[in-house]
Structures are given as C-alpha cells and as structure tokens.
Amino acid sequence: MAITLNFLGTSAGVPTRNRNVSALILNPGLVSGGLWLFDCGEATQHQMLATTFSPGKIDKIFITHLHGDHIFGLPGLLCSRSMAGSEVPLTLYGPKGLREFVDTALRLSGSWTSYPLEIIEIEAGLLFDDGQFRVRAAPLVHPLECYGFRIEQHDIPGALDAARLISAGLKPGPLFQRLKNGETVTLEDGRRIDGRDYLSPSTPGKKLAIFGDTAPTPSALLLAQNVDVLVHEATLEAAMAEKANSRGHSTSQQTAELAREAGVGRLIITHLSSRYGEQSAAALLAECRAVFSNTELAEDFAMFEV
C-alpha cells in the first residue's frame, strides 16, 4: 500500500478562510490501517470530518512543539475518540510539558479516555523501530523546544519464487514463510536451501522528514539528508528573512536551499503566514522553485503520495 501525506491544516499561527492551522496525517500503509498524526492545531477534528479519516484510526500522534497552533486541537480530538467508543491504544510523542498539557485539559474539563493513552516526552534520537519503520527526532531552532521527525521505512523484502521451489521438490507450507524471511533450511534429504536465493530484489524503503517550526539550523541538514519527501515550513517570503529567523521561522528561499543541499527528492512547503492569499502563496512557491524546482505547495486537504 502506498504511503501518503494528507494535509489538514497549512496556516501559520492563526486559521484563514482557506487554511486551518497545523495538522498532517501520514498514512504509512500498515496492514492494521493505523494512521499517524503530526501536530493537532485547533479544529483538526473538524477538518477530519471532510475526509475519509477517523480519529479512531490514529494510533500515534507526534507533536513538534507546544505552541497553540500545533496543539490546541488535541484535547478535543482525544475526547471525541473516547466518545466514539474507540479502544485502540494511542501513543503521543512530544516535548516536555505535553503530559502536563493533556492531563490538565482532561482533568479540568472532567474528561477521560476510554482507551490506553501513553504520553512519551521525547529527546533527540531514536523514538522507536517497530521492524517496519524507524522514527528519529532532532531538535530545531524555535522559541519553544521544537523537533523535526525523520521517518524511515525498512526495505521491503522481495517476493518468494514459489514456482522455482516447487519445481525443486518443495511443498508449499510453513517452510515457505521461513524461506521468505531469508532463512536457510535443511530438508529431510539433506539439502540446504537458502531463502535469499529465491527472493527477488528488495524494494528500498521510503524516507521522509517532517519538520516543526524552525529557523535555519545545521541539524536540519542531517534530518533531511537524502529523504524522498521533505515537509517544511515556508512561513514568510525571502525578503523577510530577518523577521522570520528572529521568530524561529524560515523563508521560502531558505527552505528551498535546505532541500537542495540535503539532496531531497521532493519538497512540500506548508505553514504559510496568514498574510498570504492565493496569489501571494503562489509567489512563495515560485521563490522556492527558483532554488529547488521539485517543490510543491500544500493546501488544506491536499494528498501527496510518497
């Protein structure tokens, strides 16, 4: 199944008529159907009502930082998930203070969760590796503690050539699964069969980097190095670099320069200042493309296949 990025909110700071504040669903294509949410600005659950996604399908939420335009939708989404009767466990990853924010919001509002909720306050480094994906966090430069995330899919094993095995006298069954796992097995007649000899080449896993708010920083280059897709803010235009950087943000040009230097496959810009309407947003995109041609502009409800 394809990996997709689905934008629910693409505005910086405040919502506009056409853009809600930050939220992004990553559909990693898992057999379980589980979804990952990155940031949860105000009204994220309202945005979901216009999609095919359900809060009950979200099993991981990654919060880049605790500014309101990235977390004010979280208590409502957590509670709605309970009211819908979801029992699917949910894990939240985010900076120190995330637990206090969630606990306080639920306690003061007399709310609770009907499902197991784990809150992991993160530091830089590996967050998890479940055998299908590994996710790392890296610190960014912003007035509040803020992180970007690098998501790496493990290489996908090649298909097992069952026809060759059958012609060699093997019968389909549990043995085939072991061979598909690349194991070497010994048959009753003494033959040793190396499963790797019967597998087609593996498919390289996809790599993504999803950034929180940040001014340009050396750590960004490592986080984004050679990813297939980079999702990065482009809060302000190139002429406003001093203002953007002083507030912990990047310009269109700076974001495109990072994409070029990191050797990424594709850049998707988001988190645009509310000052930009449709035409001026197109001008931001043009500034990016002048530096890094394979740039796309995220709109609310846009979907991109990785």
Image: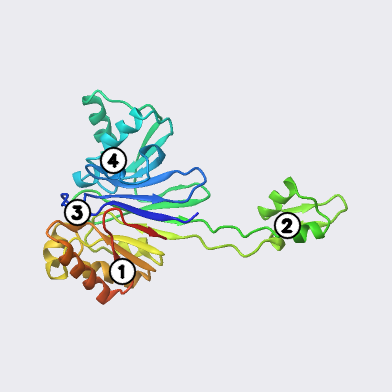
Lower position in the chain sequence, tag 2 or tag 1: 2
**Dot 4, how many residues are within 10 Å of its Cα: few (below 14), some (14-19), or many (20+)?**
many
**Dot 2, how many residues are within 10 Å of its Cα: few (below 14), some (14-19), or many (20+)?**
some
- State which quadrant residue 96 falls in: top left
Residue, disc 1: 295
Q: Name the element at disc 2.
A: helix
Lower position in the chain sequence, tag 4 or tag 3: 3
Q: Name the element at disc 3.
A: loop
Give amino acid for label 1. Thr
Residue in the foreground of this view, choosing between 19 and 126: 19
- Mark pair 4, 2: CA separation: 46 Å
Q: Determine whether 162 is above or below 265 in the image.
A: above
Residue, disc 2: 162
Lower position in the chain sequence, tag 2 or tag 3: 3
Residue, disc 3: 18
- Comparing labels 3 and 1, the label whose residue is closer to the camera: 3
Residue at point 24%, 23% (across, down) = 110
Q: Determine whether 212 is above or below 90 in the image.
A: below
Lower position in the chain sequence, tag 3 or tag 1: 3
Q: Which label is found at residue 45?
A: 4
Q: Name the element at disc 4.
A: helix
Q: Is residue 202 left or right of residue 227?
A: right
Give amino acid for label 3. Asn
Q: How far from the left and from the top, in percent, is residue 266? A: 36, 67
Which quadrant does the C terminus fall into? bottom left
Q: How far from the left and from the top, in percent, is residue 122? A: 34, 44
Residue in the foreground of this view, choosing between 194 and 58: 58
- State which quadrant residue 201 falls in: bottom right
Q: How many marks?
A: 4
Lower position in the chain sequence, tag 1 or tag 4: 4
